[in-house]
Each structure stands twice: as C-alpha cells, then as structure tokens.
Image (cartoon, grey):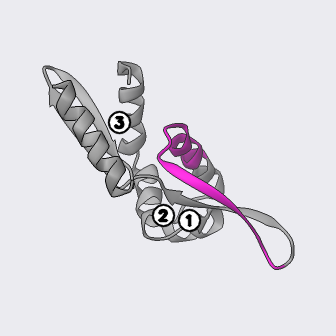
Amino acid sequence: MDDRSIEEILDTIGDQHARRLLAAISREPKDAKELAEECDLSLPTVYRRIEMLDEYDLITDETLVAEDGNHYKVYQSNFESTVISLEDDEYKVRIYREENLPDRFSQLWDELGAE
C-alpha cells in the first residue's frame, strides 16, 4: 500500500459520517435509506460515504429485489478490525478481514517467514 492510499484510508475512516455508517452496517446489512434514517444523514451524504468506503474495499454490497420488483442494494462491512500503527515515522494500516482458519494460518505463516 503506497503512502497516498494509507493517508486516504486514514482520512476515510477518520470521517465521522463514514465511521457512523460502518458502525451501523457492522451489525447487519442495511440499505441507503435505512442508513440515512439510523445515522440521521441525508441520502446524498450516505451515498458519498458509501462511495468512499467502497473505494477502499471497506464495504460490500448485495442487490436484492423488493416484493414490488424494484432492485435495491444493502451494504455490509467488509472487515473485522483495523489496526493503525506508527513505525519509524510512518503510518501502517492493517485491515483484518473475515477469513476461514486455514487462510488465517497461511497468512500468519507467510508473515512469519517474511521477517
């Protein structure tokens, strides 16, 4: 991850509205209208923040079909936790995604081998 994208991720998760949306969808998937109501935000603000969060793969979406045949999207958080550290005057951002145990073990093994 280059320095520019790290700064942009920090800016994104530092945004109060983006954090509120992430908190709301970390519990259960929600559509934009539900997010606007729950977070007391306008729909344009919700969609701008969703775009920001999606740019860094921090959310996922799924298209559903309503009973009347209309399509709509629900959004869900795409990670379990984030760790931000400062090492040697440089920020490092680590995003932990939900993975199965063998994938986590492989990742840990790869990281240990790299040190």
Q: Amino acid at mark 1?
A: Leu
Q: Which corner quadrant of the image does residue 115 belong to?
A: top left
Residue 8: give x, y in percent of width and height. Answer: 42, 30
Residue lying farthest left?
Answer: 88
Q: Are marks 1 and 2 in contact (CB under 8 Å)?
A: yes
Q: CA distance from mark 1 to mark 2?
A: 8 Å
> Which badge, 1 or 3, comes first in the chain's sequence?
3
Q: Which mark is residue 1?
A: none
Identified at 59% across, 43% down, the residue is 51
Residue lying farthest right?
Answer: 69
Identified at 43% across, 40% down, the residue is 12
Q: State whether residue 69 appears in this view.
A: yes
Q: Which residue is mark 2?
A: 25
Q: Which mark is residue 35?
A: 1
Q: Amino acid at mark 2?
A: Ile
Q: Which residues are magenta?
A: 48-67
